[in-house]
Image (cartoon, coloured by chain):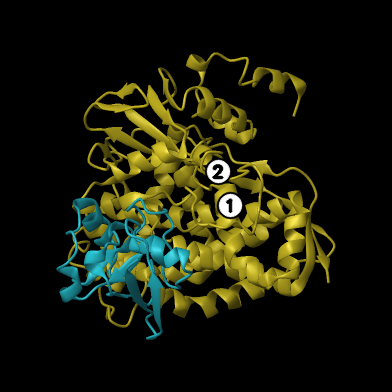
């Protein structure tokens, strides 16, 4: 990074009232950390009076976020979970952006696909896919881990969950990327392109829906058949179907993808932690939630206050937007010991904020953990170590916290 | 110190001496009882300390709050015996309570 950028981005030289941590460039540059550190110390409930998303509050401490997550009557999810307001003429509503009772009904219609019984059935399938992907990788040559492993594995997984035509699976990746990179959210994709991609997604999935209506729901366990046969979801209008598809595609794709890449990067940054797990693979189940904490694949979730609410002496007004910064909560030294350290054998590794808490807590959390556990079990069976050959290139988004490239060299055993 | 009997899904029983005033979840996790995750640490906001308590014992407990109900509702395996163990406080009044653990936490 150039000296000029570093100077420009000195969080202690910027007045607090000028802080706008929703700026996607901070995440592209990986310069957000200092801003959140200062907010946690000096102004943990912070008001930003002007941003590309309009005014919004930032909540940066773990326990304050927990308080807001639990209070879903005051802090509504209606209208969306990112700071950008959904355009009224392209309203892709879905269950994560609904309040009870509609939220509960729609969520329950699809929870079965990630139920523990189903995960047990999926495990050997995912393991076989992971093994196949890893066995095809070059040894001793530089390649982009994001493209060859993280995207490939999560996309295959998603194709299985939807029973999506396997040869077309990269379309899922494309739609997922288009959905989250829109200019309205501070990303590089023009809004018209985003909409065109998502309408194509809807068209393809409508074809699948029309076919799945005729499947026996007792036999099929894919998400589309589940939705097409559940009385609470079978009459969804097209934008609601699209909204829930995007939720499931992004939820099952970006997050796990970036945690897979992140894990490889962290092992490189903390070689002593890698040595620990290399010598004792029984540490993998505890290492996985630590990877998810350290990565925090979604930087925040948004709520909107339905009434005035007082927290830490400040009053959030009815109608105000509130960003709960998971990325900051996961570095809150009051809740997590040595939060800036990646430590694979923490005592309570699952006590992190990456999945959120309360009624909107991530539905696929156990699936995500299983995918990461399997990939690390299979990596450690095969390779000596994975060298990272340069700083990763990150994504321009303050919502999806992830990597575009992570160049690596695999060293054989 | 009241006794709490945890019964794993496979039938294995564990009798634990619990402290008055702590939650059943804390009694379980501090005695390394398998089958309780308690990701949120007792905030009634993750539903990974789900337990099953039969009607006879449930009648002796404080009823569940709206928050507990909304979290239990997310679990497709919920039954009328379902409770979140972080919301049940140990006291002499429930000496010997039987806590059945589900096969999985979500």
Colour of chain A, in one word, is yellow
Chain that is coloured cyan in the picture:
B
Chain under label 1? A
A93 up-or-down from B61: above or below: above
Residue A373 at x, y percent in the picture: 59, 67
Specify the label residue A258 is tagged with: 1
A349 up-or-down from A34: above or below: below
In this view of the protein, which residue sits in the foreground, A405 or B24?
Answer: B24
State the residue at coordinates (49%, 40%): A329
In this view of the protein, which residue sits in the foreground, A251 or A355?
Answer: A355
Q: Are marks 1 and 2 in contact (CB under 8 Å)?
A: yes
Residue B34 at x, y percent in the picture: 45, 73
> Residue A224, can we see it?
no
In the picture of the structure, the residue carrying the numbered disc 2 is A401
Mark 1 or mark 2: whose residue is earlier in sequence: 1
Question: Is disc 2 placed on a helix, strand or loop?
Answer: loop
Q: Specify the quadrant that holds the N terminus of chain A.
A: top right
């Amino acid at each position: 990074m150039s000296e000029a950028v570093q100077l420009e981005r000195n969080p202690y030289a910027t007045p607090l009232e000028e802080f706008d941590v929703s700026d996607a460039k901070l995440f592209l540059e990986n310069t957000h950390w200092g801003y959140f550190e200062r907010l946690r110390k000096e102004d943990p409930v912070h008001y930003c009076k002007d941003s590309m998303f309009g005014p919004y509050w930032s909540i940066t401490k773990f326990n304050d976020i927990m308080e807001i997550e639990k209070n879903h009557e005051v802090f509504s999810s209606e209208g969306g979970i990112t700071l950008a307001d959904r355009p009224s003429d392209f309203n892709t509503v879905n269950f994560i952006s609904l309040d009870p009772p509609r939220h509960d009904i729609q969520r329950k219609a699809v929870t079965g696909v990630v139920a523990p019984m189903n995960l047990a059935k999926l495990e050997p399938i995912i393991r076989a896919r992971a093994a196949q992907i890893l066995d095809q990788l070059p040894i001793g040559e530089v390649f982009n881990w994001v493209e060859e492993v993280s995207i490939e594995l999560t996309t295959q997984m998603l194709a299985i969950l939807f029973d999506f035509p396997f040869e077309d699976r990269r379309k899922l990746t494309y739609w997922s990327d288009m959905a989250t990179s829109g200019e309205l959210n501070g990303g590089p994709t023009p809004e018209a392109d985003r909409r065109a991609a998502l309408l194509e997604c809807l068209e393809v999935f409508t074809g699948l829906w029309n076919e799945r209506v005729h499947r026996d729901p007792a036999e099929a366990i894919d998400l589309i058949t589940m939705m097409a046969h559940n009385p609470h979801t079978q009459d969804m209008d097209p934008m609601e179907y699209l909204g829930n598809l995007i939720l499931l595609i992004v939820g099952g794709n970006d997050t796990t993808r970036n945690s897979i890449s992140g894990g490889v990067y962290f092992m490189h940054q903390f070689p002593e932690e890698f040595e620990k797990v290399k010598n004792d693979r029984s540490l993998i189940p505890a290492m996985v939630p630590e990877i998810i904490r350290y990565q925090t694949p979604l930087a925040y979730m948004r709520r909107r206050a339905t009434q005035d609410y007082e927290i830490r002496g400040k009053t959030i007004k009815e109608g105000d937007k509130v960003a709960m910064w998971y990325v900051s909560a996961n570095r809150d030294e009051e809740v997590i010991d040595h939060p800036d350290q990646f430590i694979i054998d923490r005592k309570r590794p699952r006590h992190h904020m990456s999945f959120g808490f309360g009624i909107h807590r991530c539905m696929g959390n156990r699936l995500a953990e299983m995918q990461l556990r399997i990939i690390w079990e299979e990596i450690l069976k095969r390779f000596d170590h994975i060298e990272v050959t340069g700083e990763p290139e990150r994504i321009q988004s303050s919502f999806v916290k992830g990597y575009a490239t992570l160049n690596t060299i695999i060293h054989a055993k | 110190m009241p006794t709490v009997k945890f019964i794993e899904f496979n039938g294995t029983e564990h009798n634990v001496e619990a402290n008055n005033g702590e939650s059943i979840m804390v009694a379980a996790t501090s005695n390394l009882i398998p089958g309780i995750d308690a990701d949120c640490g007792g905030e009634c906001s993750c539903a990974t300390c789900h337990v099953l308590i039969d009607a006879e014992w449930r009648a002796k407990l404080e009823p569940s709050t709206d928050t507990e109900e909304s979290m239990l509702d997310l679990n497709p395996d919920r039954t009328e015996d379902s409770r979140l163990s972080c919301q049940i406080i140990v006291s002499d009044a429930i000496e010997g309570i039987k806590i059945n653990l589900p096969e999985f936490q979500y």
